[in-house]
Amino acid sequence: MTDDDVTRLWRCRRTIFQMLQDRDYMVGRNCLLESREDVSQALSEVRNRESLVIFVRHRSDPTETLVVYFPDEQGKKVGVRPIANLVSKMEEKNIPRAILVCREKLTSFAKEALSMSSSKQRIEVFMESELLVNITEHELVPRHVPLSEVDKKALLERYKVRADQLPRITRDDPVAKYYGLERGQVVKIIRPSETAGRYVTYRLCI
């Protein structure tokens, strides 16, 4: 692995740890402060990306776990093998959610393998290039706050509207992907306003 590969992996992992924290998973301070040297040292000990798996538990429900997996295929599309390895890990440890971080695109067979995974499992796919910077820290990206089902219900009752009457955001929107929004989930978007101080809107994930 070249120095550039190590740097890209470190930047990617830094964004992932921030993203997991923003999704309310328990992320240790040592993970958030992981340095490039830490990643380089870890790679020198294990010699492949697949060993650098990340396991986290959700803060509100420690039984809800998530795994982040880095397939070690370089210079070619990601095939079925990494998908099978990830699904096996999830089944073995009873993990319902995963994030697959790829350097290359998935083959058609890998995409099919993903679609055939258990309905109890959700595997999100990110390209490494999507995670080199934290998109939510960009000055042009307003603050997004995913609502719980309780907050969503209260919002709809307050404004006397149905969820499908709200403006929409797609699951493949970069910020929606960052927060792992599900279909039917509502996100609160807070923008600065010169007159009111802030301007709040809501969007339904589709």
Image: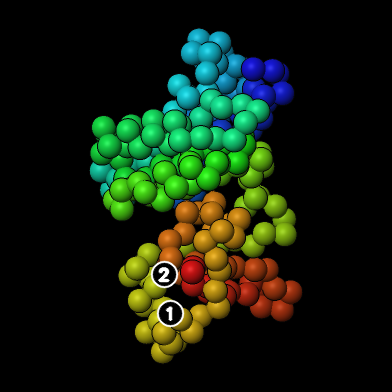
The residue carrying mark 1 is 163
The answer to which of 161 and 95 lies nearer the viewer is 95
The answer to which of 162 and 193 lies nearer the viewer is 162
Disc with the residue nearer the chain's start (1 vs 2): 1
Neighbour class for label 1 at 10 Å: few (<14), some, many (≥20)? some
Amino acid type at image mark 1: Ala
Q: Residue furthest top?
A: 45
- Taking the spot 31% from the left edge, 48% from the top edge, the residue there is 118
Taking the image as shown, residue 95 lies to the left or right of residue 72, namely left
Alpha-carbon distance for marks 1 and 2? 8 Å
- Taking the spot 41% from the left edge, 89% from the top edge, the residue there is 160
The residue carrying mark 2 is 184
Quarter assignment of residue 168: bottom right
Residue 140 pos. (x, y %): 72, 59
Residue 58 pos. (x, y %): 35, 45
SS type, badge 2: loop
Quarter assignment of residue 68: top left
The answer to which of 186 and 32 lies nearer the viewer is 186
Up the image or down, 57 lies above or below 197; here it is above
